Image (cartoon, rainbow, N blue to C red):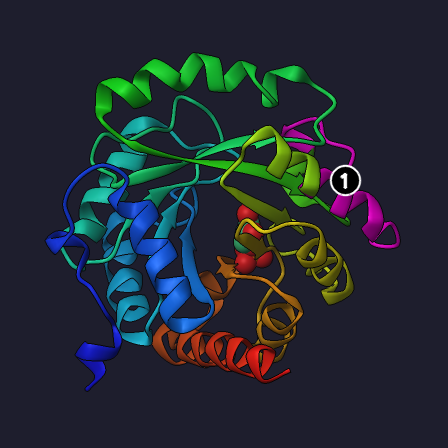
């Protein structure tokens, strides 16, 4: 029963854009998804494999690998390989720089930090990394990244002026601009370990755009995940909770269930 609920195995999917299809199919089937973020600066390969196994058992849909500071290509390789040996869901890079790409991943979020004040983080790093992505044969998932609230380490590193929580209309305007520019996904980032993006901002973005919305940063409990999905998020990302929990599987299962319940209740209205 449980195996059937997990849906299609990534290893059985072929052809171009298979990770994108996997994500969109799963959103269609389940209403909303959870992804688990592992930061190679904070987690070694053995622990990553353990987290990967627990996350998979909890029903998470993909593992994201990346971090803002102190991550090299070889560190990323080690983590990606350790996870891929264990589980059959996509491993998607979430790179903080073009020097943290691994040829062993299934795909990468090809991120542009839309509200950075420094063009390097909007198109410069992307230019530096583009041919590495092509050479490694990585599937690129274009992602308009918007940093909100306190913003955390990523906003400092990327020279971003985070959008205040009390200006959700500006968050929605960035998101709509991202859709018009042609991004396939939007990420509303509250900053790792910070305060989650308010549900009101997610709801306003949901009204404005039709592309999938990821939300992450500071989500540590099922209630918050539920509220964000209910407001319109398609993918909830959690990172810090797996570094802090004594029982990763249980902690993530609660969040995965809340995500799916949020999607069901959203449909019911
Ligand atoms: C950070 O949004 C992610 O980029 C995850 O944040 O570590 O707070 O879960 P947390």
Where 96 sits versus 230, above or below? above
The local secondary structure at tag 1 comes to: loop
Where 123 sits versus 187, above or below? above
Q: Quadrant of the N terminus?
A: bottom left
The x and y percentages for residue 136 are 23, 24
Q: Which residues are magenta?
A: 156-175
Where 228 sits versus 79, above or below? below
Residue 165, magenta (yes or no)? yes
- Tell me which corner region of the image, top left, top right, bottom left or bottom right, holds residue 95: top left
Q: Quadrant of the C terminus?
A: bottom right
217, 111: nearer the viewer: 111
52, 188: nearer the viewer: 188
Ligand 1 under 8 Å from disc 1 Cβ:
no
Where 239 sits versus 20, above or below? below
Observer able to see residue 44: no
The x and y percentages for residue 26 are 35, 63
| Residue at the image position 47 percent from the left and 26 percent from the top | 97
| Residue at the image position 34 percent from the left and 44 percent from the top | 92
Label count reads: 1
Observer able to see residue 131: yes
The x and y percentages for residue 98 are 42, 22
Pointer 1: what residue?
162
């Amino acid at each position: 029963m449980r195996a059937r609920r997990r849906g299609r195995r990534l290893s059985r999917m072929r052809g171009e854009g298979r990770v994108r299809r996997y994500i969109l199919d799963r959103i269609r089937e389940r209403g909303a998804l959870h992804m688990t973020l592992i930061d190679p600066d904070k987690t070694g390969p053995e622990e990553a494999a353990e987290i990967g196994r627990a996350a998979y058992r909890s029903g998470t849909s993909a593992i994201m690998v990346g971090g803002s500071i102190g991550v090299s290509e070889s560190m990323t390789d080690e983590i990606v390989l350790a996870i891929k040996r264990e589980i059959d869901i996509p491993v998607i890079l979430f790179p903080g720089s073009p020097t943290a790409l691994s040829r062993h991943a299934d795909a990468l979020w090809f991120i542009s930090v839309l509200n950075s004040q420094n063009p390097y983080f909007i198109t410069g790093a992307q230019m530096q990394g583009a041919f590495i992505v092509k050479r490694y044969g990585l599937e690129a998932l274009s992602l308009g990244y918007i940093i909100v609230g306190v913003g955390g380490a990523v906003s400092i590193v990327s020279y971003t002026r985070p959008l205040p929580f009390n200006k959700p209309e500006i968050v929605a305007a960035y998101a709509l601009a991202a859709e018009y520019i042609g991004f396939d996904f939007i990420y509303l980032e509250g900053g790792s370990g910070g305060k989650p993006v308010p549900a009101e901002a997610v709801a306003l973005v949901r009204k404005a755009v039709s592309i999938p919305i990821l939300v992450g940063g500071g989500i540590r409990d099922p209630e918050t995940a539920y509220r964000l999905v209910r407001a319109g998020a398609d993918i909830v990302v959690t990172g810090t909770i797996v570094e802090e929990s004594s029982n990763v599987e249980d902690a993530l299962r609660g969040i995965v269930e809340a995500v799916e319940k949020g999607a069901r209740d959203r449909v019911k209205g």
